[in-house]
Amino acid sequence: MAVTWKKLAYETDVITKALLTTKGDIIYASSASTPARLGIGTNTQLLNVATDVPAWINIPAPVAHTLNSHSVPSGAVDFDLQQATDLVVMTVTNQAALPSSGVALGQLCWATGELTLHVCSVAA
């Protein structure tokens, strides 16, 4: 059997356990070949990167959206066989109440009294 040697790293070539002081600490490079410690954030904080440096941030407040802030598409909307989520469908009481103007090509409309779905095939 042959003798095998393995080179051991010098202390300056490894990241020592002393860098980590708290459960959940993260090691990152503060510059090339310079390990640094990022202390664990608080509950509900998110890890964010700003100017190539990781940092903990508080979760931003949710932003309210209204239906009026979005416009009707001017052309076809291709879902590429994907599921449409949060799809807005116009509703009317019956087929006679379907709008005759102001509707985009492809707009869906549900007639609640008849339980039928309609699609605009010619926009006026």
Image: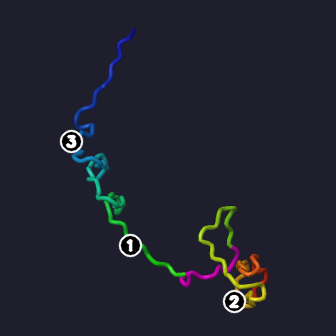
Confirm or deny contact between disc 3 and disc 2 (CB under 8 A).
no
Which of labels 3 and 1 is toward the front? 1
- Pointer 1 local density, CA inside 10 Å: few below 14, some 14–19, many at least 20: few
Q: Disc 1 designates what residue? A: 61
Decide whether residue 37 is among the magenta residues.
no
Judged from the image, the secondary structure of the residue bearing numbered disc 3 is: helix
Kindly identify the amino acid type of the residue bearing the numbered disc 1.
Ala
Q: Position of residue 79 (x, y in %)?
A: 67, 66
Number of the label disc, if any, that sits on residue 102: 2
Which of labels 3 and 2 is toward the front? 2
In percent of the image, x 27 and y 31: which residue is there? 9
Q: Main secondary structure of the magenta part?
A: loop
Kindly identify the amino acid type of the residue bearing the numbered disc 3.
Ala
For the view shown, which residue lies furthest in the front direction? 113
Q: Position of residue 18 (x, y in %)?
A: 20, 41
In percent of the image, x 69 and y 89: which residue is there? 102
Q: Position of residue 71 (x, y in %)?
A: 60, 82
For the view shown, which residue lies furthest in the bottom direction? 101
The region drawn magenta spans 67-76
Number of the label disc, if any, that sits on residue 37: none
Cα–Cα gap, marks 3 and 1: 37 Å
In percent of the image, x 27 and y 40: which residue is there? 15
Left or right side of 40 for 96: right
Dot placed on the residue nearer the N-terminal end, 2 or 1: 1
> Which one is nearer the viewer's eye here, 61 or 72?
61
Cα–Cα gap, marks 2 and 1: 35 Å
Dot placed on the residue nearer the N-terminal end, 3 or 2: 3
In the displayed structure, would residue 54 be above or below residue 14? below
In percent of the image, x 35 and y 63: which residue is there? 50
Residue 76 figure quarter: bottom right
Number of the label disc, if any, that sits on residue 18: 3
Left or right side of 61 for 30: left
